[in-house]
Image: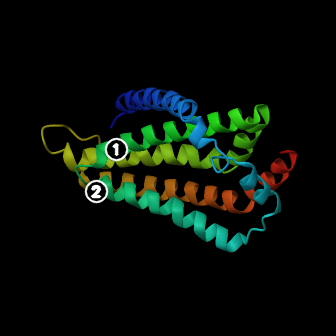
Amino acid sequence: MNRAEKNGVYRIWLYLFLGSFLLGILIMNMGNEILLGDTGIFNTASMNRLKYIEINDGKFFAYVLRQRMSGCITLLILSTTALGLISVYGVVLWQGTITGMLITAAVIRYGIKGLLLILGGMFPHQCLLIPGSIMLLGWCLENYYWFHRYGKGTVPYFRSRRQQFFHQGILLLWILLVMLIGCVLESYVNPILISDIVKIF
């Protein structure tokens, strides 16, 4: 895809994310009696556990890395299939809905402190994981187009298959490096911040 095509795709993703974000807010407000009950999201018991939990950094890093990379690998595989396009847009919709639900739940339960909890839960790793995820989605979309559109009357952005593979390979390595650093921050830095924030609840 050229720059103009990518900008168009990013605009569509933004609209989808905002729409699903509002959907997440609606779902949480309509189902707050179930989702925000005594055993629901951000309940008192779970917040108390966070205050005193001791994390094994090595095991937690392995868990985070496995969770993040399994999602990446799944998207990479799907991008080569007919489900590639659906999976990319599905991820955008899912992330928007979950984000809307989490922020709404935190605010309903704890007000301004809930926003602080969400921000603390995102920092600093999401500063890398969010742009890394966007780049990964773009990579998967481009890969899907290469497999299913180029060669069928559409002129590819790169002149040869070798140039395409080289470009895709270098970009994928960069994306995975960004995601890996984000996982390190999520495993070793974020728990320290969260343990301090939950003490005000």
Reading the chain from its start, which is encountered first: label 2 or label 1?
A: 1
Q: Which residue is mark 2?
A: 162
Q: Is residue 159 visible?
A: no
Q: Which residue is mark 1?
A: 141
Where does residue 97 sit, x and y in percent of width and height? 50, 37
Residue 43 or residue 72, whichever sits in front:
43
> In this image, 24 relative to 90: left or right?
right
Residue 21 or residue 179, whichever sits in front:
21
Badge 2 crowding class, 10 Å Cα cut-off, few under 14, some 14 to 19, many 20 or more, is few
Residue 71 falls in image quadrant? bottom left
Above or below: residue 129 compared with residue 119? below
Q: Is residue 144 visible?
A: yes
Residue 155 or residue 98, whichever sits in front:
98
Residue 139 or residue 96, whichever sits in front:
96
Q: CA distance from mark 2 to mark 1?
A: 19 Å
Camera-near label (2 vs 1) is: 1
Above or below: residue 74 compared with residue 107? below
As helix, strand or loop, the secondary structure at mark 2 comes to helix
Q: Quadrant of the C terminus?
A: top right
